[in-house]
Structures are given as structure tokens and as C-alpha cells.
Image: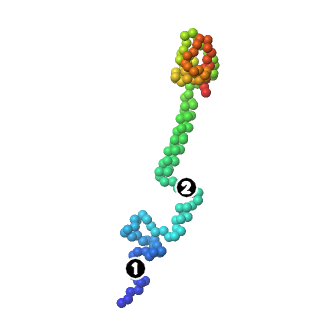
Amino acid sequence: MTIEAAQIPVAWPLRGRPHDGDISPSRPRHLRVVREGEGVQRASAPGRLRLTRRGRLVRTLAVFGVVSLFALLAWSRVTAPVLPPTHAVTVEQGQTLSQIAADELPMVPLEAAVLRITLANGLSSRSVMAGQALIIPGRD
């Protein structure tokens, strides 16, 4: 009895002829054989960007960070102390720069107020003399 080659069932795909239903023990089940040209257009479609789960998370966190930054800036503008416009004062006998800063800029922390007055007047030190005119800066 002779057996023709066409009657023998093929368990493995022949080279160059992939079979869709072929699953071999050595090949993971999540992989499948793809015919030449199949799926290539979908993967290389121009202008189409596909993000992974990590990419979507990074994008979401970046957008959240930008929105939070703008919200924080808006909130700080609303809650910032309102300072009077720029004006000048004359130093009296016995006054210090810290006393003037505390009296003239009570809404600002003392060190920041002293620094503003020092910068506005171009002072090289914190010492002031009686009769000296100082510019008290208002809101920037």
C-alpha cells in the first residue's frame, strides 16, 4: 500500500506558508502567525500615536501638574496682601530700619520688608540716619 504525500496530515507549518490556526507547544499562545503585509498598515499608520498605560499616566500627571500650578498662582494672587503705593518717609531720631519696615509694611514679614526697603533705596547696610528720606515700596 502506498501513501501519497497529500494524504499525510501536516502538524507543523511548512516554511513560507503560515497557517492561522497553527499553535505549537513551543510557541506561546498569545502569539499568532501573521501573513505578509497583514497588520503592517495599522502599526505604521501616519499621524496615529498610541500611548501605553504608563504614557497615559505620565500625560495625566503632567496636565494635572500644570493645572495645579495655575491654580496655585491664581490663589496666591487673590490672597496676597494689598500694599499701599510707593511713598517716602523721613527717618526720625532713634528709628531703625527694622522699626520703619514693621510700621510701614505690616502685611509683609519683617525680613522681607527690610529687604524691599534696602533694595528700593540702594542701601549697602541696614544702618540709617535721622533725617534720611527712604522710599517705601508698594506692591510690585
Can residue 8 be seen in this snapshot? yes
State the residue in front, 49 or 134. 134
State the residue in front, 73 or 102. 102
- The amino acid type of the residue labelled 1 equals Pro
Mark 2 neighbour class, 10 Å CA radius: few under 14, some 14 to 19, many 20 or more: few
Q: Residue at x 49, y 51 (%)?
A: 55
Image coordinates for residue 124, horizontal then vertical, percent: 57, 21
Task: Classify 69 as above or below 24.
Answer: above
Q: Residue at x 58, y 13 (%)?
A: 129
Considering the numbered disc 1 on the image, is that residue within a helix, a strand or a loop? loop
Q: Residue at x 49, y 47 (%)?
A: 58
Tell me which numbered mark, 2 or 1, is placed earlier along the sequence: 1
Residue 63 numbered tag: none
Q: Residue furthest bottom?
A: 1
Task: Classify 115 as above or below 38.
Answer: above
Image coordinates for residue 108, horizontal then vertical, percent: 54, 23
How many angstroms separate mark 2 from mark 1 (CA)? Answer: 44 Å
Residue 49 numbered tag: 2
State the residue in front, 36 or 30. 36
Considering the numbered disc 2 on the image, is that residue within a helix, a strand or a loop? loop
Give the position of the C terminus as an image quadrant.
top right
Image coordinates for residue 64, horizontal then vertical, percent: 51, 42
Task: Classify 31 as above or below 69.
Answer: below
Q: Residue at x 55, y 18 (%)?
A: 126
> Which residue is under mark 1?
9
